[in-house]
Image: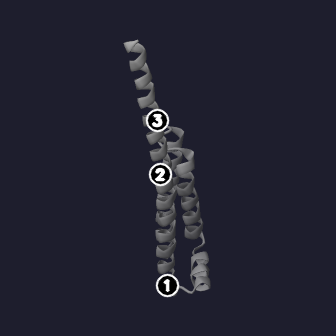
Amino acid sequence: MTVRLQIFVGIIIVFFLLLIANMVRKKKIELKYSLRWMVLCVLALILDIFPQLLYGCARMVGITLPSNMVFFVAIVLLISVIYSLATSVSHLSTKVKRLTQELALLREEVEKQRND
């Protein structure tokens, strides 16, 4: 990788890191959801600064091309994000169901009091 490309990629990574931090600051995204992205940005920045680490990790895992290592890591990270979001959606779905049931019970109780 050329130095010019490393600098360009580093600038993009820092931009995204600042963008995520700004979104957390403005409360557009919760910190627990942004932590994964922040860690990913920091890891990408480290690999951008020290590309030898990527070559070493690829060799250690048995992957021939470092670019394939990047795709492998990206797929694993995306699967973990999808799992995390699916868990959150499931939890929120259960909460909505419970709130709906409580609301129905409260409405029924209010209707009973109006009729009495």
Classify residue 56 as left or right of residue 4.
right
Q: How is the image coloured?
A: one colour
Closer to the N terminus: mark 2 or mark 1?
Answer: 1
Residue 47: x and y in percent read 57, 70
Residue labelled with disc 3: 99
Q: CA distance from mark 2 to mark 3?
A: 14 Å
The tally of labels here is 3
Q: Secondary structure at mark 2?
A: helix
Which quarter of the image is occupied by the C terminus? top left
Q: Residue at x 52, y 63 (%)?
A: 80
Q: Residue at x 46, y 74 (%)?
A: 71
Which one is nearer the viewer's eye here, 22 or 37?
37
Residue labelled with disc 2: 90
User: Mark 3, residues whose alpha carbon is within 10 Å: few (<14), some, or many (≥20)?
Assistant: few
The three-letter amino acid code for the residue at tag 1 is: Leu
User: Mark 2, residues whose alpha carbon is within 10 Å: few (<14), some, or many (≥20)?
Assistant: few
The three-letter amino acid code for the residue at tag 3 is: Leu
